[in-house]
Image: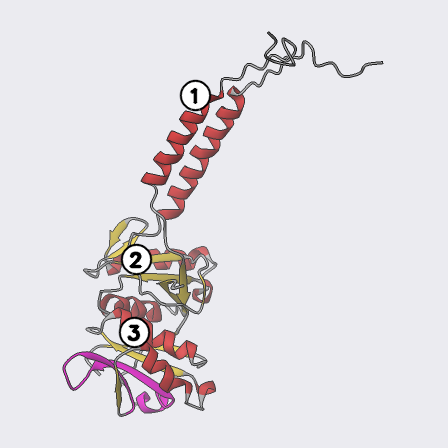
Amino acid sequence: MKLTSRGHAAKLDLQMTSMIDVVFLLLIFFLVTSSFQKTERELDPAVKVERRAGARTTDLAPTVVDVARGAGGEFVYRLGGRELTSVGELTQVLVQFENKSDGAFVRAADQAPYAMAAGAIQACKEAHFSPVSYVPTEGTP
Amino acid sequence: MRLSKRQGKKLDFNMTPMIDVTFLLIIFFMTVNQMSRTNKEAIPLPSLAGSQDQSEGTLTINVDLAGAMIVSSRTVNMNELIALLTTAISDVGGEPGQVTIVVRAHRDGTCRTVNDIIRTLDKLQITRVRLAVESTP
């Protein structure tokens, strides 16, 4: 009885099984042990430091977003007389402003949550203010 | 005339050099990957879209939840940071405007340390500061 047509002609002798085993084991090992990093981006605010000398009002004449304590004691975004709680709300309000070429200032006190300060810069950027300046303040504004 | 002959042809794959090269590549990429992470601490950043893709800065300052500053896996105080910044300025020919600082601050922290860093950068006339954020889809 003839089982193979090629018979004794081609003699393939590849021991791939063990290699594939090892490769898969390594693959699983690296998949389990690796930690995937999230993609990072960045905000590039202009940096301004508030001076105690008189120029305060002229320096901060354009749009100013304060990250400050609101009436309820929680930190909020204060824009003029308004108190806003989320980046979305802040963006919606800022988009309606007209003097975007004058730039915007984000003032954050030392005690303010950093995520809120970064959120305020993001909102100004999304509302197409240019430049957006970050102004650190010492006390609660 | 018969050109190809299947009979007697023995395929012999030598896998050893391929495995050698593969392992060398794995080790190479693991090492490079590890080196590129030394500047970046495992700090959760604010989840925001950001305004531009991250580019490499002259110096990366990590700020953890407690407000400690970490540069190249080493916790530094403000005086040490000033020394590092001064060196960075010297390295670019004494032009503070050429120095780019990336600040990676913990999303749940306060602005205190970030504000201190920015005041220090202002004193050293460094104006190019970037705040790292975690990209949201």
Camera-side residue of B3 and B114: B3
Whether residue B133 is visible, yes or no, is yes
- Residue at image location 28% in from the left, 58% down from the top: B44
The tag on residue A18 is 1
Residue B51 placement (x, y as % from top left): 44, 69
Residue placed furthest toward the right: B1
- Residue at image location 45% in from the left, 23% down from the top: A19
Amino acid at the residue labelled 1: Ser
* Callout 3: chain: A
- Looking at the rendering, the stretch of residues picked out in magenta corresponds to A55-80
Q: Do pointers 2 and 3 mark residues of a single chain?
A: no
Q: CA distance from mark 3 to mark 1?
A: 56 Å
Dot in front, 3 or 1: 1
Amino acid at the residue labelled 3: Ala
Residue that label 3 marks? A117
Residue B26 placement (x, y as % from top left): 44, 34
Residue A49 placement (x, y as % from top left): 32, 77
The tag on residue B62 is 2
B51 up-or-down from A101: above or below: above
Camera-side residue of A123 and B6: B6
Q: Do pointers 1 and 2 mark residues of a single chain?
A: no
**Left or right: residue B9 compared with residue A133:** right
B72 up-or-down from A114: above or below: above
Residue B107 placement (x, y as % from top left): 27, 64
